[in-house]
Image (cartoon, rainbow, N blue to C red):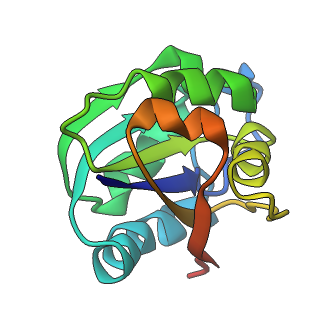
Amino acid sequence: MARTLVVVRHAKSDWHRDLPDEKRPLAARGRREAPLIGPWVADNVGKVDLVVCSTATRARQTLSLSGLVAGEVRHDERVYAATYQELMSVLDELPDDVSTAALVGHNPGLSDLVRMLTNESLELKTSALAVMTWRGGWPDVWSRRASLVSHATLRG
């Protein structure tokens, strides 16, 4: 079975408040750009079975405002500040009946994940997405044989 992974870096966050990193909300620009994500995914990927989202405020807000439609949404604290190895462990646990998943999180982990899976360097700026595919199950992501199908940085 072919697998599709949509990697989404959260939209621009607000650095003007004295809050712990995990609690930083979206900035005005992030609130404008986040709604562009769902339509882009619908047009370029189609149906998403599962979204796994960081528990950080800016990631949760990005997902909430994105309009991204999915069969199921999970918030996983392991995605916050995760390395690519930790993200790969999250992917390894996805159910076998999920063919398309989205991961909403942070850099540098997301950009490193794309590089490790596709052998292509891609800096994911805020509100950026990358779509990768491979054949096999989710645990096969460890083989790092994914193809980078498309990517975009959405600006509103």
Q: Nearer the viewer, residue 39 or 144?
A: 144
Kindly identify the residue that appears in the image at 78 percent across and 53 percent down.
115
In this picture, is 104 found above or below 134?
Answer: above
Q: Position of residue 114 (x, y in %)?
A: 70, 53
Residue 108 visible from this viewpoint: yes
In this picture, is 30 found above or below 61?
Answer: below
Kindly identify the residue that appears in the image at 47 percent across and 63 percent down.
34
Q: Is residue 131 left or right of residue 102?
A: right
Q: Nearer the viewer, residue 13 or 85?
A: 85
Q: Is residue 105 left or right of residue 40?
A: right
Q: Position of residue 122 (x, y in %)?
A: 80, 65
Kindly identify the residue that appears in the image at 61 percent across and 80 percent down.
155
Residue 23 visible from this viewpoint: no
Task: State which quadrant residue 15 falls in.
Answer: top right
Q: Nearer the viewer, residue 130 or 75?
A: 130
Q: How many marks?
A: 0
Kindly identify the residue that appears in the image at 67 percent across and 45 percent down.
144
Q: Position of residue 127 (x, y in %)?
A: 60, 64
Task: State which quadrant residue 22 falls in.
Answer: top right
In the picture as drawn, the residue positioned furthest to the left comes out as 71
In this picture, is 98 found above or below 152?
Answer: above
Q: Quadrant of the C terminus?
A: bottom right
Q: Is residue 23 left or right of residue 131?
A: right
